[in-house]
Image (spheres, helix red, strand yellow):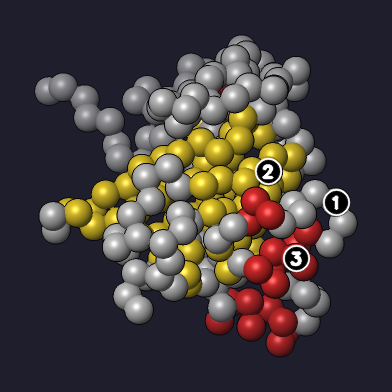
Amino acid sequence: MPSVTPYYADWSASGLTGVWVAANTREAIYAAFRRKETFGTSGPRIRVRAWAGGDLGNLDLDGRGRAGRLYDRAVPMGGELTASDAPVEMFAEASRDPRSAWLQRLQVVKGWVEDGESREKVFDAACSDGLSVDPETHRCPDNGARVDLNTCAEDFERGAAELSAHWIDPEFDPLQRAFYYVRVLENPTCRWSTWDALRAGVEPMPGTEPVIQDRAWTSPIWYDPAP
């Protein structure tokens, strides 16, 4: 009988949930959950956040006070955007877990319903190592980061400690209801099953991916074209 790869064969081992708050208090944390200003990770303590709005290009997106300016002019993750003729613009930023791999790319995932079918499309928004997003495919080139499967040594010569991007939806339809969320990917690292095999001195479990790209993702921002 042919072997069947389990559906969980490329999963990570655990995950974390985070919230963005103004103060580390029970009340502030509860309020953040209520407004859905949250993010998740596949395990590492990556931090990521995003805002969406219009005409963000005229906003100072550098230096101190950037988050405050974005809160004044844009909707944070978990929020809703109302109808607009201007394309949806997003600003996103992420920073790596100091004890984990470097970051490889920052992405925007867009979802909508078309002809009764759910659709999703991934747009790379920022690339590490000075690479640029291809304007045709909307994807970053491979930064070449690899893992030594004999030792699980990671590649610390490639990647970024922080990534940020100002992104404008190139396929915006003002009449199309949609959602947007931000995702950030690390360089490849050994999957937990590969680490276990290395420690035990045996071959990795058959049918499982030897490496994984851990990641973090934000709550979505919804665009509603209804007046």
Relative horizontal placement of residue 76, taking residue 85 as reference (left or right): right
Q: Is residue 188 above or below residue 217?
A: above
According to the picture, the residue beneath numbered tag 3 turns out to be 69
Of 94 and 80, nearer the camera is: 80
According to the picture, the residue beneath numbered tag 2 turns out to be 164
Q: Check disc 2: other Cα within 10 Å, few if <14, some if 14-19, many if 20+.
A: many
Q: Residue at x 32, y 47 (%)?
A: 120
Of label 1 and label 2, which has the lower sequence position? 1
Q: Secondary structure at mark 2?
A: strand
Q: Quadrant of residue 188?
A: top right
Task: Measuring from the top left, give residue 4's x and y in whole percent.
Answer: 22, 30
Q: CA distance from mark 3 to mark 1?
A: 11 Å
Report the amino acid beneath label 3.
Arg
Task: Measuring from the top left, give residue 124's x and y in whole percent.
Answer: 51, 36
Q: Secondary structure at mark 1?
A: loop
Task: Measuring from the top left, give residue 107's x and y in whole percent.
Answer: 52, 41
